[in-house]
Amino acid sequence: MNISKFRIAVATGVFLFSLAIISGCASKLCIAPYPLPHVKVKMHTPGYWISKTDNPDKVIMSAKRIERFNEINCTKGTTLEKVILMDNIMSGRQLSENILSSIKDIRKKKRYTTDNMRVDNLFFEAIYRNIDLNKIPDKINVKFGLTLRRANLRILPTDEIIMSRKNEHDFDRFQDSAIDVGQPLALLWETRDKKWAYVKTEITLGWIHIKDIAISNNKEDIIEYSDVKEFVVVTGNKVDIFSDSKCEKFLDSAQMGTCFPLMSSKKGYFIITFPVANRRNKLSFRKAYIPIYEDVNTGYLLYTKRNAINQAFKLLHTPYGWGGMKGERDCSRFIMNVFACFGIRMPRNSSRQARMGVKIARIEKLSPCISTLYLPRHIMLYLGKDNENYYVIHDTWAYTEGKWPRVTKKHIGKVVVSDLSLGEYSKTGSLLERLKIMKIINGEY
């Protein structure tokens, strides 16, 4: 081999090795098979699992019991809270400490921008200046409002994608959650540039674009909107909402579990109350229309195993979205959306969702379709047992097979049915081996 060819070979080798390191410790990345291992095509239908369930139409919890269940959960450290019950005054010192604590936690970790550069001190100094903590008074006059559209809730007031590893653009670590349209919130502070508001929602604290919320002069308006007795709940993956009765002018869309006050229903559509903002960004309301053919229900669905599994399978194959990125959902949002159809409020994060319900020691004692399985940073809905294998439906990004140096990462990126042996030959072990908490959501503890 001549010297020029040798140099080309060396350069190529170095490039490929570097590429392997960047993609994750020289692991091989490929698309997961469909169906997944041990999954039959017929398992992708809700009827298959309903047929294996005892008493699928038995009501698990009544509406009153669900309401009581929600009230108890608000006191159990799950971060759930009814925002409209907050005091109108908040301690400025407490607010400052909350914001500072979140910033300090972030600064302890390595973070990268989309061009794979380390997030530096200049970045955080700009954030500090815009938050303007020194201007926070001793007492905060809390303002209350509603979200005008589905909006991102950010850990810091910036839209910049910040990653924990280079090239992980699908995992924005500043994306805490997404808040559905019409959700009550408390506005606690605004940035200096008036573009961001620090808010408390019913599931978490964070920063949201001011343009995505409308503030009410009267707290009772929000209470009336949120606690209305006649309402429709979105029971499909997503439904379209229109501004005209002919349903020709698109207004917005809403995800599963979102509720709207019902004004009336006509032959071809539901008339709902929809939040809007006037020129001064004050809360107002307008009529909006949902076609009768859309997947919505008047009032919450009955909480039965049949309904639970039907709702979960409506989301089968829908895309994964970390923290609600790109208008989609992750594992915990999947759980939230399914249970919201029954009026059951679930916290935002999987670790907090794992505190809900009755703890079960043995998987054989779980109740199919209404049980959650938790492992670190992931949560799933239990389907049942088939041929000695345990099955779940869950929203997941990927799984690994093999051990170093022959590691294969298999990308899924959607809601799937799998058994708990998934990843069994990897370094971390199978889903079953990694299980930490199993719960039944039946109103008990």
Image (spheres, rainbow, N blue to C red):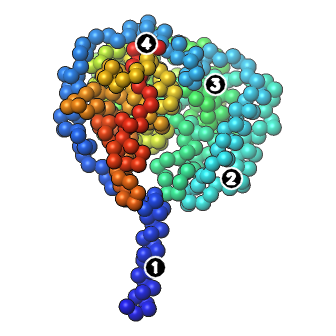
165 in relation to 225, above or below: below
- Foreground of the two, 25 or 11: 25
- What secondary structure is marked by label 2? helix
- What secondary structure is marked by label 4? loop
Quadrant hosting residue 331: top left
Whole-angstrom CA distance, mark 2 to mark 3, is 27 Å
Answer with mark 3 or mark 4, whichever residue precedes in sequence: 3
Q: Amino acid at mark 2?
A: Phe
Pointer 4: what residue?
443
Q: Amino acid at mark 3?
A: Ala
Q: Amino acid at mark 4?
A: Gly
- The label on residue 186 is 3
Callout 4 crowding tier (Cα within 10 Å): few <14, some 14–19, many ≥20: some
Residue 135 shown left or right of residue 2 in the figure: right
- Foreground of the two, 391 or 197: 391
Residue 119 shown left or right of residue 308 in the figure: right
- The label on residue 123 is 2
Pinpoint residue 401: horizontal percent, then vertical percent.
Answer: 34, 50
Of circles 3 and 4, the one toward us is 4
Whole-angstrom CA distance, mark 3 to mark 4, is 29 Å
Answer with mark 2 or mark 3, whichever residue precedes in sequence: 2
Tag 2 and tag 3, C-beta contact below 8 Å: no
Of circles 1 and 3, the one toward us is 1
- The label on residue 374 is none
Residue 294 appears anywhere in the view: no
- What secondary structure is marked by label 1? helix
Pointer 1: what residue?
11
Whole-angstrom CA distance, mark 4 to mark 2, is 46 Å
